[in-house]
Image (cartoon, rainbow, N blue to C red):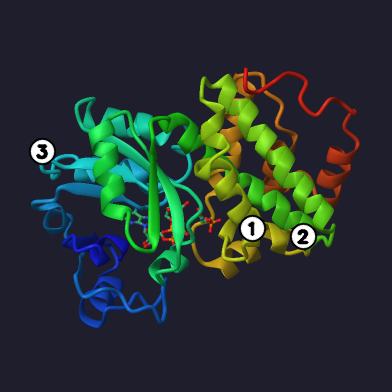
Amino acid sequence: ALIARHDHPTVLWGRDAAAVAAIEGGGENPRYLPGIVLPGALRATTSLHEALADAELVLVVVPSHAFAETLRALAPLRPPQAGVAWATKGFEPGSGRFLHEVAAEMLGDEVPLAVVTGPSFAKEVAEGLPTALTVHSDDAAFCRQVADALHGPAFRAYTGNDMRGAELGGAMKNVLAVATGVADGMGLGLNARAGLITRGLNEMLRLNIALGGRPETLMGLAGLGDLVLTCTGDLSRNRRLGLALGRGATIADAVREIGQVVESLQTADEVMRLANAHGIELPIAEGVRDVLHGTVTPAEGLARLMARERKAEYPQSLFG
Ligand SMILES: NC(=O)C1=CN([C@@H]2O[C@H](COP(=O)(O)OP(=O)(O)OC[C@H]3O[C@@H](n4cnc5c(N)ncnc54)[C@H](O)[C@@H]3O)[C@@H](O)[C@H]2O)C=CC1
Ligand SMILES: O=C(CO)COP(=O)(O)O
């Protein structure tokens, strides 16, 4: 909708024929964006072939568990001029690979790739509310092309060239949003929430540095920005999962109630796999992983965090 509003002919591909028909015929996505009038210039189709014909830019927005299969499907249909960007947040489930690694393998090294990430609830973007996010790519020209398509009167698109850091921020904030949701659901107060956000940012920074990423990416829209949004905004599915668990709901009931993708369910395992591989301690992410697996209750997770040894806030500088 955002790109179509900027006068770019835009075709949305979806697999659900009823949803596609509602968008194409009625200008509305009743399940995901009820009541929001979509721009007339936005077309919709169930044919990936039709969606990709003559495309100058492909933006993938499926959940992380469908990322690889979607890229496999689009690879032979992609026009040679079209670079591929994605707003998906997470890792490849099972392998823990970064999505830019999956994309490079599926599409080849020659295809321009970009990550679109930052604090942006879809509903608010669709409503035209002011939003800022960031586009990261190794290909400066493609990065500008993607940012130009998104940038407009109600939307600021910044640019950068740290795909790894940008992807790590978008993935980890979902896990940390569960932690603040749990704390809020348990009624632990505003101090606890701020403490979790800040120590959560510290976890992001430490893992990112161990992976060779740049700290400033995580201090920007892709890290801190999205962390604050998702940890405090009740539109977040990951925060809502935590809230429900903190109030005593089961995971199955909470996920059913939310009815949309909750990326932390996949991502918590993959974050801990990465952390363990690099010998990095992430107590908050680890607590979320264990609560999501049902091996620790929210109360036990809290007790575990509070019983940790006292230490320096920054044992060593994160900024060199
Ligand atoms: N909703 C939001 O505010 C934002 C979401 N994201 C990210 O975007 C990704 C998608 O999230 P949402 O659209 O919010 O999830 P959602 O649960 O609202 O919608 C997922 C959509 O993907 C489709 N889908 C699922 N599996 C598919 C497959 N195998 N092939 C084709 N389509 C498939 C579903 O039918 C549905 O239309 C996630 O990684 C999320 O973290 C990023 C920024 C903001
Ligand atoms: O990524 C998002 C906002 O930037 C959406 O967060 P949730 O997936 O938790 O709803």
| Label 2 environment density (alpha carbons within 10 Å; few <14, some 14–19, many ≥20) | many
Instruction: Give me the C-alpha separation between circle 2 and circle 3.
Output: 49 Å
Q: Which of disc 1 and disc 2 is earlier in sequence?
A: 2
Kind of residue at disc 3: Pro
Kind of residue at disc 1: Arg
Reply above or below: 256 against 209.
below
Q: Which of disc 3 and disc 1 is earlier in sequence?
A: 3
Point 67% across, 23% down: residue: 280
Instruction: Give me the C-alpha separation between circle 1 and circle 3.
Output: 40 Å
Left or right: 277 in relation to 303: left
Looking at the rendered structure, the secondary structure element under dot 3 is loop
Which residue, given by chain and number where applicable, does mark 3 sit on?
80
Point 68% across, 45% down: residue: 293
Disc 1 and disc 3 in contact, CB within 8 angstroms: no
Q: Which of disc 3 and disc 2 is earlier in sequence?
A: 3
Kind of residue at disc 2: Asp
Residue 126 visible here: yes
Which residue, given by chain and number where applicable, does mark 1 sit on?
239
- What mark, if any, has residue 184 been given in the picture? 2
